Image (cartoon, grey):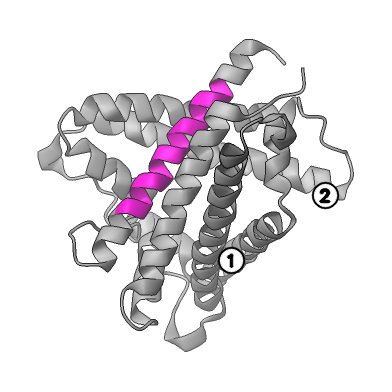
């Protein structure tokens, strides 16, 4: 594989790791009353923009997220890792392309946010706004079908995270046997297991939001768009004390660290 492509992948892994690590840290702080916030990916970008040298941070992060999107597109279209052309492989490559679109949008949002006038407001809110156009799109039967489809896709993604954790498939990316240091192998395994489980939990809850809205369960409608921050609130409201939210948040930090280890130790077949 071309070294330039590898560098794009490594930069992308690091940027994705930063987003998940910050998301987990902020949620963990919220769980134990240390400030923070229950933030999704867009809120993380807005949080960083407010920090010292925030615009520089966003420029680096946005570039990294665009690199990750490019790597996903390469995985999907060029198939440098020689994924099988069976049904499972096709679904996997389609999911790579969709992931690329999501992170491309997130990277562009981070770059655009650099030039936004803070006093004008971000317009993103909690992710539920969208004006009359989005409301009309998400209302009625069309909105229901969209939410059900997204919910099923997210449910499948959540299950896939648990399967990856159970089988330990994620370790193949490292050629783990080539790592001579035992503690390093154990660290990567633990970060991967904890991170995938936490990510599966959060994704599963978001899938539940979309499906209940699509089917109109509990009085919710397809106009009610919820994401990661609402998933954190759901965990906190349906558990005794801060411990469950804290554990999930810590797991997301672990997933961020796992992405950093991918940026450092990921092996590619040349």
Disc 1 element: helix
Q: Which residue is mark 2?
A: 88
Residue 188 placement (x, y as % from top left): 57, 43
Residue at the spot 39% in from the left edge and 60% down from the top edge: 249
The part of the image, by quadrant, that contains residue 245 is: bottom left
- Residue in front for this viewpoint, 208 or 252: 252
Could you say where residue 35 lies in the image, as x and y percent from the top left?
A: 17, 59
Question: Is 5 placed left or right of 90 in the picture?
Answer: left
Q: Quadrant of the C terminus?
A: top right
In this view, the residue farthest toward the right is 86
Taking the spot 32% from the left edge, 59% from the top edge, the residue there is 27
Image: 159 above or below 51:
below
**Residue 20 falls within the magenta-colored stretch:** yes
In magenta, the rendered stretch is 8-25
Whether 61 is among the magenta residues is no
Residue lying furthest left = 119
The residue at the point 73 percent across, 39 percent down is 172
Quadrant of res 100: top right
Please report whichever mark, 2 or 1, sits nearer to the chain's N-terminal start: 2
Q: Considering depth in this image, is 202 or 69 the residue closer to the camera? A: 202
Label 1, on which residue?
151
Farthest residue toward the bottom?
218
Q: Is residue 50 above or below residue 150?
A: above
Mark 1 Cα-neighbour bin, 10 Å: few <14, some 14–19, many ≥20 = many
């Amino acid at each position: 594989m071309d070294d330039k492509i590898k560098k794009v992948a490594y930069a992308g892994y690091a940027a994705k790791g930063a987003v998940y690590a910050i998301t987990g840290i902020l949620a963990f702080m919220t769980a134990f009353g240390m400030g923070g916030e229950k933030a999704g990916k867009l809120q993380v970008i807005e949080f960083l923009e407010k920090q010292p040298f925030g615009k520089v941070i966003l420029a680096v992060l946005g570039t990294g997220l665009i690199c990750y999107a490019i790597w996903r597109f390469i995985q999907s279209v060029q198939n440098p890792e020689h994924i099988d052309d069976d049904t499972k492989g096709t679904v996997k490559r389609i999911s790579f392309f969709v992931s690329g679109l999501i992170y491309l949008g997130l990277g562009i949002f981070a770059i655009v946010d650099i030039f936004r006038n803070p006093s004008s407001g971000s317009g993103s809110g909690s992710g539920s706004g969208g004006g009359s156009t989005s409301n009309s799109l998400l209302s009625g039967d069309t909105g229901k079908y969209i939410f059900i489809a997204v919910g099923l896709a997210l449910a499948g993604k959540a299950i896939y995270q648990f399967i990856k954790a159970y089988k330990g498939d994620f370790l193949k990316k490292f050629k783990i046997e080539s790592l001579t240091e035992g503690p390093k192998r154990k660290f990567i395994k633990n970060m991967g297991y904890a991170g995938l489980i936490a990510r599966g939990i959060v994704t599963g809850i978001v899938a539940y939001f979309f499906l209940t809205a699509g089917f109109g369960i509990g009085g919710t409608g397809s106009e009610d768009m919820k994401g990661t921050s609402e998933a954190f609130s759901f965990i906190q409201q349906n558990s005794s004390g801060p411990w469950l939210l804290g554990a999930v948040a810590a797991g997301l930090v672990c997933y961020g660290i796992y992405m950093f280890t991918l940026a450092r130790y990921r092996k590619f077949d040349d």
